[in-house]
Amino acid sequence: MEANKQICNTYEKNVLIIDDSPTVRHKIKLILKRGRLFDKYYEAGTAKDGLVLLEQEQNIELVICDVVMPGMDGFEFIQEMKSTPSWRDIPVIILTGQDHVQQKIYGLDTGASDYLTKPFNPGELIARVRVQLKVKQLQDELKIAKMRYKELSITDFLTQIYNRRHFMELFDLEFSRTKRYGLSLAVMIFDIDNFKKINDTYGHLQGDRVLRDISSLVKAEIRTHDVFARYGGEEFILMLPQTAIEGAKLVAEKIRRKIEFHSFDKIDKLTISIGVACYPSESIDDEEALIKAADDALYKAKEQGKNCVVLACKS
């Protein structure tokens, strides 16, 4: 989260000034430069040119826009701007030469953040700009916090892969899609052989390192649309959309071998047992049955001596 804050605090802060009068634009620019509020100052003589600049330039933190302009006026500009998701949160201060309350109310209702009446006081302009920049900064930090909270709520703290709850949410959605379109879906459940012995011999910190290392090894072997999660303790679960049993078997064997021959810190040898199940199958008609089939196959892998892959079904 600190890294996200640093990004917000270090990128360029730019302003877009839209007014059909070059004199007014120049005056605003000089005032803002004295306040040292922005890195770059973009100017447009029409609202349409302003929209083009918004499309082309990055990190525009604020727009100052005149109301009365040829062609598209300031209110139409704001409506167009607020209808574009990537521009929606950029604050807009409108400039008006008419001190009509109804016009100001309409501007604020349209989506403007604040307004200034011409001729404006330089100190008031800087003060209002500072307020809007502060509000936007707080909004950006809140967005980052929400994103971080969402990330934490779906991620296993130790391994930084999905947690069981989020996996099941995605699994339910994918199973429904698979069933609707007549596709294949494979699930594998695996756990670390003799993991208790690792904890007892080397300590729980070393056991945690093993869980993290295995998570990284598996992530490197799967596709971007595969879903990998910590299922509980030393158990992991992997969902392979649009994958039949033979394809899932190849993936499982690849993962098993990679872990078997990987050099883990302080541990001579480490292996996993894997149970694989797939849909469609005569014995599987819902999500619960698919998970249970993979889990039963894992149990058989343990019974067969561990460090192996057992298939629960054939398509």
Image (spheres, rainbow, N blue to C red):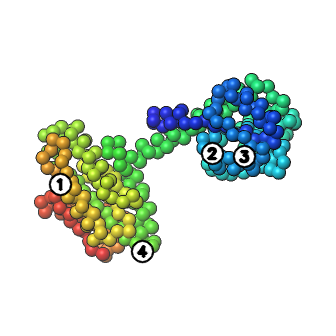
Q: CA distance from mark 4 to mark 1?
A: 35 Å
Q: Quadrant of the N terminus?
A: top left
Q: Mark 3, residues whose alpha carbon is within 10 Å: few (<14), some, or many (≥20)?
A: many
Q: Position of residue 294 (x, y in %)?
A: 27, 63
In terms of sequence position, does the residue under pointer 2 or pointer 4 come before the other? 2
In terms of sequence position, does the residue under pointer 4 or pointer 3 come before the other? 3
From the viewer's perspective, tell me whether residue 78 is left or right of residue 242: right
Which residue corresponds to mark 2? 57
Helix, strand, or loop for circle 1?
Answer: helix
Which residue corresponds to mark 4? 182
Closer to the camera: disc 2 or disc 4? 2
Q: Position of residue 39 (x, y in %)?
A: 62, 33
Helix, strand, or loop for circle 3?
Answer: helix
Q: CA distance from mark 2 to mark 4?
A: 46 Å
Vertical position of residue 295 compared to residue 5: above or below: below
Q: Quadrant of residue 196?
A: top left
One can see residue 284 in this view: no
* Residue depicted at x 84% and y 40%: 103
- Which amino acid, by three-letter code, is at mark 2? Glu
Vertical position of residue 249 compared to residue 69: above or below: below
What's the mark number on residue 78?
none
- Between 230 and 94, the residue placed more toward the observer is 94
Give yes or no for contact between labels 2 and 3 (Cβ–Cβ under 8 Å). no
Q: Mark 2, residues whose alpha carbon is within 10 Å: few (<14), some, or many (≥20)?
A: few
- Which amino acid, by three-letter code, is at mark 1? Glu
Which residue corresponds to mark 1? 260
Which residue corresponds to mark 3? 50
- Between 25 and 239, the residue placed more toward the observer is 25
